[in-house]
């Protein structure tokens, strides 16, 4: 049996015959179901063998076809759930039919995942993976934040037209230095990295240190951002101030909207100056590691903000968030505020 591995942008061409799709889920006992649509409409002429609940046979591919996976009996796939799909050509005349194996896909937190796209092409059937982007390993906390983001939004990545560039901008003043040394800032950066892998969807994610101006760090892989921030603090003298409203370097020049997360240890003195700028192209979100009661007494911020209780001396934010999925999910949901246009479906999910 000729067997092909389908991954990335690869295309496999099959003979024009009925196709059999076999699903296997690896995870905590959850079931799933395969659905097939052609030109956006559900295909009703599917064969589902009674003795093989994980198999679907598509008798004919007449137009562009999408094969999608949905959870059965639950709203979303729990973490961790890995989907395995194989496709075989139903050809009884051949003793050696063609077969495709799709690279494993993490569907944790999703309520739907498009798996493969099939289309007639030059007298054959063209088969491609529906999405070829792979997840980076962001470490336990970053990976958990990514799953929490997907659970809230119900998708693996936002559509490209909704995606945002993101900046993790850290207060460079001396009052934040302790939060860097005890790993708190790194934990916050890991969570934002997990969120950004879903919301940025391949657009630029950068880091910066902010005092009276923005100091963007060189471009780097998403996985390196937390460590790069720590390294910057080891090699610089803390500033005496922090201007959260300081303009982003004009040379940054990104085409898409930008979400700037300002990580600090309290309410900035210039918080009242924070507002959207650049023709609604830039959004600023305060991430304050401080006493929530003190934050409220100071009046908070009119712009979206996330307040994180400062960890005790014997605790770490990293371990606390990993040990409390509810707190992590609440933090992720707060970070998603204002990421999407008001009235959009994604905004509705965040504000639900």
Image: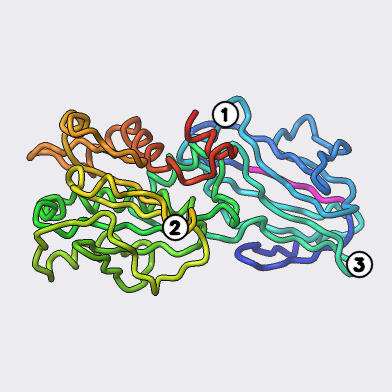
Q: Name the residue under label 3.
A: 123
Q: Mark 1 points at which residue?
A: 75
**How many residues crowd around disc 1 within 10 Å: few (fewer than 14), some, or many (20 or more)?**
some
Task: Tell me if residue 72 comes above or below residue 174 in the rendering.
Answer: above
Magenta segment boundaries in residue numbering? 18-23
In the rendered structure, the answer to whether residue 244 lies left or right of residue 277 reads left
Residue 145 location (% of width, % of height): 38, 44
For the point 35% across and 42% down, which residue is it? 303
Mark linked to residue 258: 2
Look at the numbered discs 1 and 3 and tell me whether their residues touch, using CB distance below 8 Å.
Answer: no
Q: Which colour scheme is used?
A: rainbow
Report the residue that reaches farthest toward the top: 73
SS at circle 3: loop
SS at circle 2: strand
Of labels 1 and 2, the one closer to you: 2
Q: Nearer the viewer, residue 271 or 149?
A: 271
Give the spatial CA distance, label 1 vs label 2.
31 Å
Of labels 1 and 3, the one closer to you: 1
Task: Tell me if residue 224 comes above or below residue 262 in the rendering.
Answer: below
Residue 233 location (% of width, % of height): 15, 64
In the rendered structure, the answer to whether residue 338 lies left or right of residue 103 reads left
To which quarter of the image does residue 346 belong?
Answer: top right
Q: Nearer the viewer, residue 241 or 131?
A: 241
Sequence-first tag of 3 and 2: 3
SS at circle 1: loop
């Amino acid at each position: 049996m000729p067997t092909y591995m389908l991954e990335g942008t690869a295309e496999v061409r099959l003979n024009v015959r009925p196709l059999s799709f076999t699903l296997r889920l690896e995870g905590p006992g959850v079931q799933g179901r395969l659905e097939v649509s052609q030109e956006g409409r559900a295909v009703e002429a599917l064969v589902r063998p009674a003795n093989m609940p994980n198999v679907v046979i598509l008798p004919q591919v007449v137009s562009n076809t999408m094969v999608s996976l949905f959870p059965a009996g639950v709203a979303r796939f729990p973490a961790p759930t890995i989907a395995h799909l194989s496709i075989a050509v139903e050809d009884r005349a051949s003793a050696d039919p063609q077969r495709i194996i799709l690279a494993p896909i993490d569907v944790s937190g999703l309520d739907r995942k498009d798996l493969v796209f099939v289309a007639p092409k030059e007298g054959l059937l063209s088969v491609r993976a529906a999405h070829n982007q792979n997840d980076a390993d962001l470490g336990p906390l970053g990976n958990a934040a990514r799953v929490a983001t997907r659970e809230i939004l119900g998708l693996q990545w936002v559509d490209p037209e909704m995606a945002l560039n993101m900046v993790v901008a850290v207060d460079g003043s001396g009052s934040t230095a302790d939060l860097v040394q005890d790993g708190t800032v790194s934990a916050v950066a890991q969570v934002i990295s997990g969120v950004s892998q879903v919301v940025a969807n391949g657009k630029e994610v950068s880091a910066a240190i902010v005092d009276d101006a923005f100091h963007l760090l060189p471009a780097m892989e998403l996985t390196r951002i937390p460590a790069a921030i720590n390294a910057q603090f080891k090699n610089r003298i803390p500033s005496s101030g922090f201007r959260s409203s300081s303009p982003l370097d004009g040379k940054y020049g990104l085409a898409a909207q930008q979400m700037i997360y300002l990580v600090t240890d309290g309410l900035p003195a210039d918080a009242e100056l924070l507002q959207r700028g650049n023709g609604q192209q830039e959004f600023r979100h305060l991430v304050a590691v401080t006493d929530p009661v003190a934050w409220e007494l100071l009046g908070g911020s009119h712009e979206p903000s996330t307040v994180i209780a400062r960890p005790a001396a014997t605790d770490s934010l990293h371990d606390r968030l990993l040990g409390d999925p509810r707190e992590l999910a609440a933090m992720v949901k707060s970070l998603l505020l204002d990421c999407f246009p008001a009235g959009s479906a994604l905004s509705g999910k965040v504000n639900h």
